[in-house]
Amino acid sequence: MTAYEGPPSGSIRVLVADDQHLIRAGLRVIIDAQADLRVVAEAADGAEAARAATTSRADVVLMDVQMPGVDGIAGAQLVHQARPVARVLMLTMFDLDEYVFGALRSGASGFLLKTTPPGELVRAIRATYGGGMLFAPSVTRRLVEAYVRQGPAVSGVPAVLGALTDRELEVFLAIARGRSNAEIGAELFMGESTVKTHVTRILAKLGLRDRVQVVVLAYECGVAQGPA
């Protein structure tokens, strides 16, 4: 993972979406204590979060999964429709499979438990803002277990991936294993700038928004085998 260099100007603008006022207040205290982070809005459900993300120009949305009305999974989809540049980091008390995969399919960039220590939460916000993917250890285990349960990888290349060159397919599979650009470069003997170029082409060819959607597609195609 590349070193965090901070936002290009000002602070990372964070929106906190949770139906419990005390939770929102606690998260605000943690976030606003950081020089490079600032809570710019709060919301009590997913629909409100989508509206607030636009008006507040939020960079990162901390989204509770379980909320009355429009929940966090649907809320993440609404946020991406209303403000595509915003990154969504899901927060929940539970690491159930349906939440994990629902969050992934909604385009979330990470999934953390509410028991995550404040320091790790802060680092997760920065990593998410920087375009990274971040999952709680227990969530990562569930993803790996799901890959194992689905059986061996399919033989050959699925038709949906046919547009990729051999090199792009290698990069695609590395992304699906959770590798950073630096790690992919080291594995495939490429410079990090070259990896970034391949990633950009992969996303464009497959019509994907980000690396999270790469992981979801790899899982659905049966070509992902979990981190090695």
Image: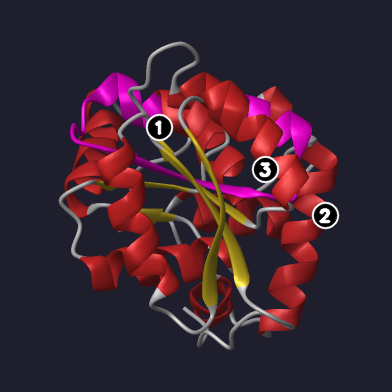
Q: Amino acid at mark 2?
A: Arg
What residue is rendered at 20% in x and 35% in y?
Answer: 145
The location of residue 224, given as percent across then percent down, is 43, 39
Q: Earlier in the sequence, mark 1 or mark 2?
A: 1
The residue singled out by tag 2 in the image is 201
How far is mark 3 from mark 1, CA to CA? Answer: 39 Å
Of the numbered discs in the image, which one, if any, rests on residue 200?
Answer: none
How far is mark 1 from mark 2, CA to CA? Answer: 24 Å
Residue 197 appears left or right of 178: right
Mark 3 packing: few (<14 Cα in 10 Å), some, or many (20+)? many
The residue singled out by tag 1 in the image is 153
Q: Earlier in the sequence, mark 3 or mark 1?
A: 3
Q: Of residues 204 and 187, which is closer to you in this image?
A: 204
The location of residue 171, given as percent across then percent down, is 62, 59
Q: Earlier in the sequence, mark 2 or mark 3?
A: 3
The location of residue 207, given as percent across then percent down, is 80, 35
Q: Of residues 209 and 86, which is closer to you in this image?
A: 86
Q: Amino acid at mark 1?
A: Ala
Of the numbered discs in the image, which one, if any, rests on residue 53?
Answer: 3
Q: Is residue 29 above or below residue 216?
A: below
Mark 2 packing: few (<14 Cα in 10 Å), some, or many (20+)? some
Tell me if residue 130 is in the magenta stretch: no
Looking at the rendering, the stretch of residues picked out in magenta corresponds to: 78-101
How far is mark 2 from mark 3, CA to CA? Answer: 28 Å
Residue 113 at least partly seen: yes
